[in-house]
Image (cartoon, rainbow, N blue to C red):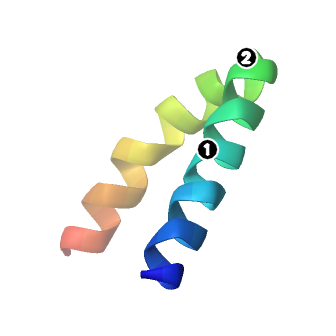
Amino acid sequence: MLQIAKSIDIMIEVTTFMLSHREVLILYKSIAPKAIAIGKI
């Protein structure tokens, strides 16, 4: 249970960071599909 709460906290921190750094979010959005595609290979 503690592990789940911890990962949720990390997700919130990451999301907050992403929202406060719009350029990072745009960069992430452009990289994520490529990373997913590479992961599927």
Q: For the N terminus, which image quadrant?
A: bottom left
Q: Secondary structure at mark 1?
A: helix
Q: Is residue 24 left or right of residue 2?
A: right
Q: For the residues labelled 2 and 1, say whether their Cβ atoms are less than 8 Å apart.
A: no
Seen from the viewer's position, the closer of residues 18 and 30 is 18
Where, by quadrant of the figure, is residue 16 drawn?
top right
- Residue at image mark 2: 22
Q: Dot 1 corresponds to which residue?
A: 12
Residue 36 rendering spot, x and y as whole percentages: 31, 58
Mark toward the viewer: 2 or 1? 1
Question: Where in the figure is residue 29, as x and y percent of width and height?
Answer: 49, 31
Q: Residues within 10 Å of mark 1 (few under 14, many from 20)?
A: few
Q: What residue lies at 58% left-to-right and 37% top-to-bottom?
A: 28
Please name the residue shown 26% across and 58% down the image.
37
Quadrant position of residue 35: bottom left
Dot 2 or dot 1: first in sequence order is 1
Residue type at numbered disc 1: Ile
Badge 2: residue crowd in 10 Å (few <14, some 14–19, many ≥20)? few
Q: Is residue 2 left or right of residue 1?
A: right
Give the Cα separation between the discs numbered 2 and 1: 16 Å
Observer-nearest residue: 33 or 12?
12
Q: Position of residue 30 (x, y in %)?
A: 50, 32
Task: Determine the secondary structure under disc 2.
Answer: helix
